[in-house]
Image: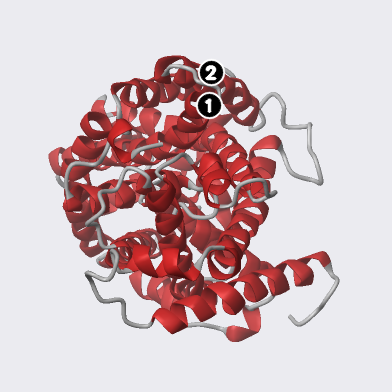
Amino acid sequence: MKTGERANFGSKIGIVLASAGSAVGLGNIWRFPCETGENGGAAFLLVYLLCVLMLGVPIMIAEFLIGRHSHANTALAYKILSPGTPWRWVGRMGVLAGFLILSYYAVVAGWTLDYTVQAVANRFNVMAASDSTGQVFTEYFARFVADPWWPVAYLALFLLMTHLVIVKGVEKGIERSSKILMPVLFLILVVLVFCSLSMPGAAAGMEFLLKPDFSKVDSQVVLSAMGQAFFSMSLGMGCLCTYASYFRSDANLAKTALSVGLIDTCVAVMAGLIIFPAVFSVASLTPEAGPSLVFIALPNIFQAAFGGVPVLAYLFSVMFYVLLVLASLTSTISLHEVVTAYLSETYHLSRAKAARLVTAGCLVLGCLCSLSMGVFKEYTVFGMNFFDLFDYVTAKLMLPLGGMLIAFFAGWVLDRRIVWGEVTNEGSIRFRGFQLFIFILKFVAPMGIGLVFLNELGLFRWL
Ligand code: PHE
């Protein structure tokens, strides 16, 4: 496939922002605090940062170079780079992972839509006025997610929004929206960090997030941190590989990966700084609250910070939820794009038709996940409901496995000249630390991830 036949991102900054738009989303603002809370706080954060640096950034560069060199969707990329080998299954597994992630991710994204509507209708202020303990928000969340209709309706609406952007195409839809939304989101997060730090539980929250207790690091913590790093950076499933296939030839892959990693990590840490002070300030919340954590903590933060001036509480909560919706949207778009590009290029379908199939499929699976919080609560697999199962299988198994294979592919299988050519743009830019980069791809990433898996399976205990 020639470059000219495919759409391209228009500008370098557009490339960084679109990739960051994929990376920054519910993974940072909802999943990161949730995982940090369940895995003991600061020790988890430390392992997470290590994973981002040692695995995340190098594997992101690997995905970028695979995508840009092949100019194809992720499954086709391996076919082009290593024809006739089973490597194409790595791409296919990524497409499947993307499909599964989108299905349950859109459920949570749907919740953010409801919270936006509630914020716009001023319901949070009214709820807060009826009960100063914050218990109302806990009850509201529990009631809402267990409802058989509303979460499903919002899930459908969110998938529809994603669908419409995807059908519009790469540059107009994805790039333009990311360029405006990302900086605004960042600004509002900064304001919220300051608000949250002024809450009564701020000191305890900060200690939880920043004072590591290494006795808490066990195999679960390491696997969770690794999975979270992959999930948050959109790695291990060919998402950034697909985006990179739209990159121009003068994009600096290493620099882009570093910027995206940095932006993504900053947003996650800021979300932690926002959520944990609030968690320790609200009697009805504990850090282990799981998926409900952010949804209960946030309305409390707005009330605590601006409750005295309801107009401000109103404005800030509306703005925040709108941005959360948009941040989720740039991520669901990237997930959808992986599957749509695969279907349309492999089976020669029009983009619109491929997109319709993806949206419909995700709607069915998404309903299953959504209802597993309520009417389907009793149905569990390995003790997990469908929602948790989807999350576990994708984030803790498929993404790290995908990341491991991608690193192995770029380190051992791909011609070194291709790797060098891509990261240096055929020698026109410098890439310091090339040997280290290759060493990580060849040994550190595959062995590190492999050991965590072996440990998890109980085959080789070192933690
Ligand atoms: N990284 C996204 C987030 O943090 C989620 C995502 C995962 C997107 C995998 C694409 C691929 O919200």
* Circle number at residue 261: none
Name above or below for residue 295 compared with residue 412: above
Q: Nearer the viewer, residue 123 or 179?
A: 179
Give the colour scheme of this rendering.
secondary structure
Q: Is residue 336 left or right of residue 123?
A: right
Query: In the image, residue 181 lies at what x, y percent?
Result: 20, 42
Q: Are marks 2 and 1 in contact (CB under 8 Å)?
A: yes
- Circle 2 packing at 10 Å, graded few (<14), some (14-19), many (20+), is some
Q: Secondary structure at mark 1?
A: helix
**Between marks 2 and 1 in the image, the one whose residue lies nearer the viewer:** 1
Q: Is residue 245 left or right of residue 317?
A: right
Q: Is residue 29 visible?
A: no
Quadrant in the picture for the C terminus: bottom right
Query: In the image, residue 125 lies at what x, y percent?
Result: 27, 35
Question: Who's the residue at 56% across and 65% down the image?
Answer: 407
Q: Nearer the viewer, residue 307 or 412?
A: 412
Q: Amino acid at mark 2?
A: Leu
Question: Who's the residue at 23% across and 71% down the image?
Answer: 429
* Circle number at residue 357: 2
Name above or below for residue 321 compared with residue 65: above
Residue linked to disc 1 = 343
Q: Is residue 359 left or right of residue 373?
A: left
Marks 2 and 1, how far apart at CA: 9 Å
Question: Who's the residue at 53% across and 45% down the image?
Answer: 80
Query: In the image, residue 236 lies at what x, y percent?
Result: 54, 54
Q: Quadrant of residue 95?
A: top right
Q: Amino acid at mark 1?
A: Leu
Query: In the image, residue 20 lies at what x, y percent?
Result: 31, 52
Name above or below for residue 353 compared with residue 161: above
Query: Nearer the N terminus, badge 2 or badge 1?
Result: 1
Q: Nearer the viewer, residue 164 or 379?
A: 164
